[in-house]
Image: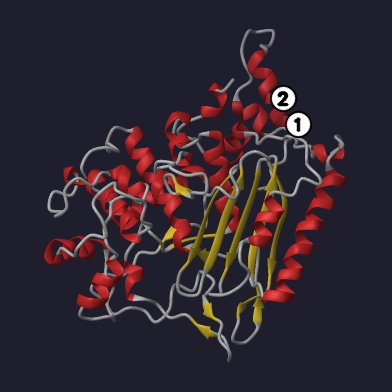
Amino acid sequence: MKLRFSIYFICILLFFSCKNNDNEMFEQEEYENWPKVNTDSIFINLDKKKIEDKAAQVDKVFIKLKKKTSFNGVMLYAEKGRVVLEKSYGVSNLRTQKGQLKNDDVFQLSSVSKMFTAEAIMILHNRGLIDYDADIQTYIPEFPYEGITTRMLLTHRSGLSRYESLADEHWPDKRKFFTNDDLVEYYVKYKPDPYTTPDRTFHYCNVNYALLANLVERVTGTSFVDFMQHEIFDVIGMKKSFIYDAPKDEDMPTYLPYECVQGYYLGRRRPRQAENEYLNGVKGDKIMFSNVEDMYRFWVAVDYGLLVPDSIQAEAFKPGSPIRKKKQDNYGFGWRMTYKHPDCVYHFGWWKGYRSFYMRNNKEDRVLIVLTNTDRGPNADEFWKLLEDNTSSLAPSSTNIHYIEYEEGLRFPYSSYLLRE
């Protein structure tokens, strides 16, 4: 995200605190036509050399991964409020080896979608529409399991069994999409044995976040697709992001929408394009599409408290399960935590020809976003090394939120960062 400050905008701020001789402020129409001056020609960026060196260091890592693991995807690395490197490596069509990937290409996020679903729940909680600790039967009365709360869904402590197994066994026509409504109907109809009793233990299971999408629809009366678009993507300017809206009661398209990069399976022979999947009709746990620029914009919104107050947002990064031993991983609201990297939060995703990585080092204020269109590739070891490499560090910087609002015509619901000490 490249944000440039213009002299005319600085003047606007000055005039808000000063009045002219007639005790009247300048009208917006007067300063909108003032000339814009590129401040890059006036001010010296003292961190320029450090940023260039850091970008070269990050680039070297991904060039090496490209050679050793056939890494194929797009990445963005940011530190201390500045995008250090955003770059694509490889091609969009792995069968023909044609079509160079672009930085703004859109990928399926797989399970990284969960952090966005959790954000929707936090927005509704802040509005008083969802109680974290109320039984979900409050919102889905027909759901046949008692004692499961929204908080348990968010933190994967519901104990429910996998919906994928349920659908594989009973869904009659795999050429038609299985949807969130079908999911609820099948749990009511077949009532599969749960994995364990509610809140007994952490058990990562996609059904939890699929049900959260149902909760959004039940309490708002609007579709999950529309809620995410209007209440998150449009609000913070995620212009290329969307939730896949599978056509109900129609034959399933062979492939995912062509406005996104297609996923591929890498085998011993020629790469095979991933076909559509009947479970792609289930939202909330996966099937969100985005690019690295939009995803970094989401982090800025989270970091600055633009969607919900800080007190609400902070719960996303708190361990959702009791910590009974030192070597224990954990899960908040849509974000993972691991004892191996105690200062970090993250989520990875894999689903039908796509892999995704969203990693944040809170202590050093670093973010790494990696999106790929292959089912295989590098593991996260090199990514963790990048996030925790302190051989060089940039000076703190900040994003001008007011400028974004003015320049892009946005109005963020909250400005929590203004209230921080």
Q: Secondary structure at mark 2?
A: helix
For the question of whether residue 409 can be seen, the reply is no
Give the residue drawn at x 20%, y 42%: 135
Q: Quadrant of residue 320?
A: top left
Count all numbered tags in the image, as a single digit.
Answer: 2
**Image quarter (top left, top right, bottom left or bottom right) of the C terminus:** top right
Give the residue drawn at x 42%, y 33%: 312
Dot 1 crowding, Cα within 10 Å, few <14, some 14–19, many 20+: some
Q: Which amino acid type corresponds to the residue marked 2 in the rendered image? A: Cys
> Label 1 belongs to which residue?
7
Depth order, front residue of 123/317: 317
Residues at circles 1 and 2 in contact by the CB criterion of under 8 Å: yes
Label at residue 23: none
> Label 2 belongs to which residue?
11
Residue 266 % position (x, y):
56, 82
Q: Quadrant of residue 33?
A: top right
**Left or right: 223 in relation to 69:** left
- Is 51 drawn above or below residue 249 in the view shown? above
Q: Which amino acid type corresponds to the residue marked 1 in the rendered image? A: Ile
Residue 404 % position (x, y):
60, 38
Depth order, front residue of 177/192: 192
**Left or right: 97 in relation to 206:** right
Residue 330 % position (x, y):
46, 48
Depth order, front residue of 344/5: 344
Give the residue drawn at x 23%, y 52%: 197
Give the residue drawn at x 23%, y 81%: 173
Depth order, front residue of 412/298: 298
Furthest toward the bottom, the residue is 269
For the question of whether residue 259 can be seen, the reply is yes
Q: Secondary structure at mark 1?
A: helix
- Is 198 drawn above or below residue 291 in the view shown? above
